[in-house]
């Protein structure tokens, strides 16, 4: 050992001399190598290394290493997105290691796009992005709320204010006749929604709006693409972030329903006007002590709480992030609540040219909805909600000792005590979701990287409803005095396989990024349910114990899509930009010869501000013009739509003896020639930055034409099929203009101000339906009065009906109108005779409103003063109408309570009113669809407000805490609107046979669950 130790200094000296001579040789050979790292010592992969004044350049590998040959003894320029460029003189060196400093003004310049990122200056498509720094400023119960009002061209409408309510997202209008929404890409996994995400886990959300940006996803992108990237770890020590908040919600607006005395007076007026006998409960047997206020008892102040914890960090080769979230929201309507539990783990490992990334997300949601709120035929105010024993009831007859039927005594036979039903019924929708992927990649040669992405989405959904045997349900006829179990289990899995090759290289003034790949995704949904009735006890809830199994619905659906795609991004001298994309998709939903579709796109960009003639322009910091055109397909049809349904147990009568013979028959007509819908988008855009980019503008004008849109047609009766069959016969056009401006300025050492605003204008029109009839939907009553009509030349789901032109003041005036639909008299609505033929008939109906806003806008204000920060976000819409369905219930419904304002109905002594006379018979058919129900949907609101205080550094240092911030926040603090319903954001109702939120029911408000106002107190701590 001593001998070895004596040789160590000599060996080290020789190695040092060899390395020095090697450096000299390398320098003489014209080759320089080294490593590029950031301020924390971590390598920067893909950094640019260029010999100044030449076209000789290269990029760093995964470990930040580079090697550049044929260099003279000049200067090397090192640059990387989000960092300040650095120039280093070679001066005979063969090894040059560089540390780049972050450039705060450029940190937002990287935009997430399909299968990668891109410098904003190189972007040719229409892409909007919201970063975590903006998302974290507010408290959201649902991730989709982070998009609302923040992006021009992106419409987000919540489906009312119920806990766990979903949102409808439309990007640049609706171009299909279905309810299909955008594609969501969460950390590389393609999925159909973002409900399982914890908003605090989001690092950024990018929305790809035009075909140039979204074409890389082909048929999946017909309705736009939303790319969500979750937070990853950062190199350095372990960091712990904790955020908790607690608050209360309250109803914003209430409706003035009649009390018992008011109801009795309105009901008696109706009977008198109709010439009918008054109902005893409202006249001779009226007792004001038997009274209830259903809506006052249904609404409440409700708590909401949210807690997040996140651990993140990393070392030289690894990064990790682990987070957990608990969200608990009680509904402002009693007997409704929602809980969400999430856990997410993200990690990456890098070694030389190999990199492995993984993300795993687990979510459990437990939703207890209240589907009875504002139900038709609800309990009358002359009936108590509970009897003297404290039990829910729907009739006072027995307790009052009255021997009569509800119909003869109250005037209503079916009585829904919706609050009692909600309290007694057991309803739970539980979903357990896994969403994750595994992505290894390897740099084969300099600039060429292969990546494999394996993704999986899996969930199990249990929808459980047990309706007990109770008199309150017997009065409705729902369970006929028998307890009922309705339970469905759905298992869904979707796996994704993607192989991509990406080559990026800088050749002097030329930069190319070439992407090619193959992807395949298969989804399977399997459901099994049971509807069982007649249990020996309300405590026994096992289907096998029921007297009868009414139905056992089941379903198994599988679909697959395969795709090949390629994209070229080319940049010359940071001035001229080209993006070309092509994708070829094959779908199992079509027949073999129609299965494949090819969808190309191209975009050009010009960075005008990088031209030499702009060098002396001190005002304009950035100016870019871009134009794009692309085609995207959509396999927007249900699975097995091309496969006829067979009844294997049909019977035929054959032979002279007319004997019944068992066989099979086709029971559903199909069209096997359906194929891809195609959306063709043209986009012209401009981006302008002035005052050193402190003030920025983005503008886009687009035309989006959807052709071969699938629409259902009824086959001729002689075919024997009654179902609607899809055909590629419709076309839809959306045109619009989008504008975004943002400004940020540090006005002093203590004060920073930021302002951003956006708006979008949209014109939606159906340009063709082919042989299809106009689509009539939008029912808002149990009597199936439809309100919307989709036809050529009009927006999708336009409101269609009569125009109210006052109230008839005399019977003679009403008779002279010759109303073919009703038999009006004095006090009934007068409708306009639009065709001038002297009759009021179906031909006098017209388009009377549009549920889609012409204008949507948002405004964001941020201010920081010393340790205080203020964030205000406003948004609004204009130019749309809402159908206020509660007007039907409040004025015209035969069974149920009335608005107190129905006392202001027309009478011979009250003629200056817009409310027709009180009537049950409604011989004039006042309840028909008309402008009476429509109200302006315009609103302007303070959507979010938050005031925070960050504790001083001196205090934090003593407490060994990196950050501590206390904040108060408010949601929907105020809303300016003329809408008289609960809230002017109503989404789409779900009435109809399908039971889904149909696009043809847009803007129809049946008394949607009220949207609450919310206040929270929160604390953020980082260690």
Image (cartoon, rainbow, N blue to C red):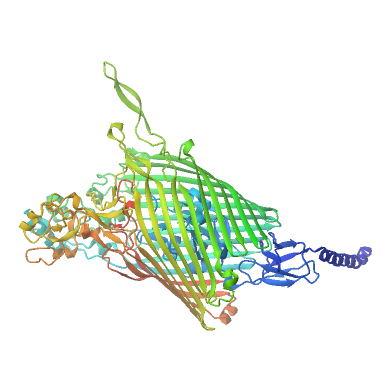
Depth check, front residue: 462 or 801: 801
Q: How many marks?
A: 0
| Apparent side of residue 778 relative to residue 872 in the rendered image (left or right) | left
- Residue 661 in the image, given as x and y percentages of width and height: 32, 21
Q: Is residue 1007 above or below residue 482?
A: below
| Apparent side of residue 644 relative to residue 263 in the rendered image (left or right) | right
- Residue 20 in the image, given as x and y percentages of width and height: 85, 67
Outermost residue to the right: 3
- Residue 636 in the image, given as x and y percentages of width and height: 42, 46
Quarter of the image that includes the N terminus: bottom right
| Apparent side of residue 1017 relative to residue 403 in the rendered image (left or right) | right
Q: Is residue 482 above or below residue 917?
A: above
| Apparent side of residue 976 relative to residue 50 in the rendered image (left or right) | left
Quarter of the image that includes the C terminus: bottom right
Q: Is residue 142 above or below residue 492?
A: below
Can residue 362 be seen in this snapshot?
A: no
Depth check, front residue: 270 or 793: 793
Can residue 12 be seen in this snapshot?
A: yes
Q: Which residue is depicted at the point 80% across and 69% down?
A: 93
- Residue 982 in the image, given as x and y percentages of width and height: 29, 64
Depth check, front residue: 360 or 722: 722
Outermost residue to the top: 656
Depth check, front residue: 797 or 908: 797
């Amino acid at each position: 050992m001593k001998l070895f130790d004596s040789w160590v200094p000599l060996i080290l000296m020789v190695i040092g001399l060899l390395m020095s001579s090697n450096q000299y040789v390398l320098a003489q050979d014209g080759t320089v190598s080294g490593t590029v790292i950031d301020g924390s010592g971590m390598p920067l992969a893909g950094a640019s290394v260029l010999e100044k004044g030449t076209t000789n350049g290269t990029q760093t590998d995964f470990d930040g290493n580079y090697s550049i040959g044929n260099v003279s003894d000049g200067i090397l320029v090192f640059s990387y997105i989000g960092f300040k460029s650095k120039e280093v003189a070679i001066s005979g060196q063969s090894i040059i290691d560089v540390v780049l400093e972050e450039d705060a003004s450029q940190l937002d310049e990287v935009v997430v796009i399909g299968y990668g990122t891109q410098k904003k200056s190189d972007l040719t498509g229409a892409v909007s992005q919201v970063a975590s720094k903006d998302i974290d400023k507010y408290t959201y119960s649902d991730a989709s709320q982070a998009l609302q009002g923040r992006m021009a061209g992106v419409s987000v409408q919540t489906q009312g204010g119920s806990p766990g309510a979903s949102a409808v997202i439309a990007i640049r209008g609706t171009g299909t006749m279905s309810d299909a929404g955008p594609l969501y890409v969460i950390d590389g996994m393609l999925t159909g929604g973002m409900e399982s995400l914890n908003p605090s886990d989001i690092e950024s959300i990018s929305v790809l709006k035009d075909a140039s940006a979204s074409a890389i996803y082909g048929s999946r992108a017909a309705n736009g693409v939303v790319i969500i990237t979750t937070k990853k770890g950062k190199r350095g020590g372990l960091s712990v972030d904790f955020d908790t908040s607690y608050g209360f919600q309250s109803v914003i607006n209430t409706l003035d329903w009649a009390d018992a005395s008011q109801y009795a007076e309105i009901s008696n007026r109706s009977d008198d006007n109709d010439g009918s006998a008054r109902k005893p409960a409202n006249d001779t047997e009226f007792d004001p002590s038997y009274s209830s206020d259903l809506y006052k008892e249904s609404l409440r102040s409700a708590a909401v709480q949210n807690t997040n914890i996140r651990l993140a960090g990393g070392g030289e080769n690894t990064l990790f992030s682990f987070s957990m979230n608990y969200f608990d929201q009680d509904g402002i309507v009693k007997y409704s609540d929602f809980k969400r539990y999430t856990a997410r783990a993200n990690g990456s490992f890098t070694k030389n040219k190999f990199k492995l990334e993984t993300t795993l997300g687990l979510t459990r949601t437990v939703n207890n909805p209240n589907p009875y709120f504002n139900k038709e035929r609800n309990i009358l105010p002359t009936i108590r909600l509970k009897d003297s024993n404290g039990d829910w009831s729907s009739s006072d007859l027995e307790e009052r000792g009255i021997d009569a039927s509800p119909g003869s005594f109250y005037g209503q036979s079916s009585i829904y005590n919706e609050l009692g039903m909600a309290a007694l019924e057991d309803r739970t929708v539980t979903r357990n979701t896994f969403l994750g992927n595994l992505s290894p990649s390897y740099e084969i040669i300099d600039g060429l990287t292969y990546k494999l992405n394996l993704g999986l989405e899996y969930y199990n959904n249990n929808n459980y409803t047990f309706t007990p045997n109770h008199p309150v349900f017997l009065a409705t006829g729902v369970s006929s005095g028998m307890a009922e179990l309705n339970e469905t289990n759905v298992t869904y899995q979707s796996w994704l396989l993607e192989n991509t090759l990406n080559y990026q290289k800088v050749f002097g003034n030329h930069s190319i990024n070439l992407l090619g790949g193959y992807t395949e995704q298969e989804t399977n949904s399997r459901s099994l349910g049971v509807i069982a009735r007649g249990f020996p006890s309300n405590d026994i809830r096992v289907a096998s114990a029921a007297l009868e199994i009414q139905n056992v619905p089941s379903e198994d659906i599988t679909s697959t899509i395969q795709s090949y795609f390629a994209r070229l991004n080319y940049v010359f001298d940071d001035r001229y930009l080209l993006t070309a994309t092509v994708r070829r998709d094959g779908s199992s939903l079509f027949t073999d010869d129609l299965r494949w579709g090819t969808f190309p796109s191209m975009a050009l960009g010009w960075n005008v501000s990088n031209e030499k003639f702009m060098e002396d322009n001190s005002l304009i910091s950035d100016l870019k013009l871009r134009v794009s055109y692309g085609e995207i397909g959509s396999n927007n049809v249900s699975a097995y739509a091309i496969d006829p349904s067979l009844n294997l147990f049909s019977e035929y009568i054959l032979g002279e003896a007319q004997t019944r013979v068992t066989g099979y028959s086709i029971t559903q007509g199909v069209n096997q020639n359906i194929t891809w819908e195609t959306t063709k988008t043209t986009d012209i855009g401009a981006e302008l930055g002035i005052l050193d980019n402190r003030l920025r503008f983005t503008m886009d004008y687009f035309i989006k034409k959807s052709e071969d849109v699938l629409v259902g047609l009824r086959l001729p009766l002689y075919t024997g099929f009654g179902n609607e069959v899809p055909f590629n016969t419709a076309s839809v056009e959306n045109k619009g203009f989008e504008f975004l401006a943002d400004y940020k300025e540090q006005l002093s050492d203590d004060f920073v101000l930021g302002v951003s605003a956006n708006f979008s204008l949209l014109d939606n029109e159906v340009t063709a339906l082919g042989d299809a009839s106009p689509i009539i939907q939008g029912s808002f009553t149990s009597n199936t009065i439809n309100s919307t009509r989709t036809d050529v030349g009009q927006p999708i789901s336009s409101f269609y009906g009569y125009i109210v032109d006052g109230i008839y003041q005399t019977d003679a005036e009403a008779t002279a109108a010759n109303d073919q639909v009703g038999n009006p008299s004095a006090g009934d609505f007068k409708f306009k005779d639009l065709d001038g033929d002297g009759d009021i008939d179906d031909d006098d109906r017209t388009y009377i409103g549009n549920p889609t806003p012409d204008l949507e806008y948002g405004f964001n204000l941020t201010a920081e003063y010393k340790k205080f920060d203020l964030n205000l976000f406003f948004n609004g819409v204009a130019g749309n109408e809402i159908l206020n369905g509660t007007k039907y219930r409040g004025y015209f419904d035969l069974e149920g309570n009335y608005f107190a304002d129905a006392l202001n109905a027309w009478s011979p002594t009250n003629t200056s009113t817009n409310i027709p006379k009180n009537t049950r018979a409604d011989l004039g058919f006042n309840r028909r669809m008309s402008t009476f129900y429509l109200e302006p949907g315009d609103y302007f609101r303070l959507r979010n407000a938050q005031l925070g205080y960050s504790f001083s550094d001196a205090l934090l240092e003593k407490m060994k805490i990196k950050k501590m911030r206390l904040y108060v926040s408010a949601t929907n603090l105020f809303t300016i609107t003329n809408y008289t319903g609960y809230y002017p954001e109503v989404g789409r109702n779900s009435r109809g046979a399908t039971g889904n939120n149909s696009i043809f029911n847009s803007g129809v408000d049946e008394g949607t669950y009220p949207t609450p106002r919310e206040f929270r107190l929160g604390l953020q701590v980082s260690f």
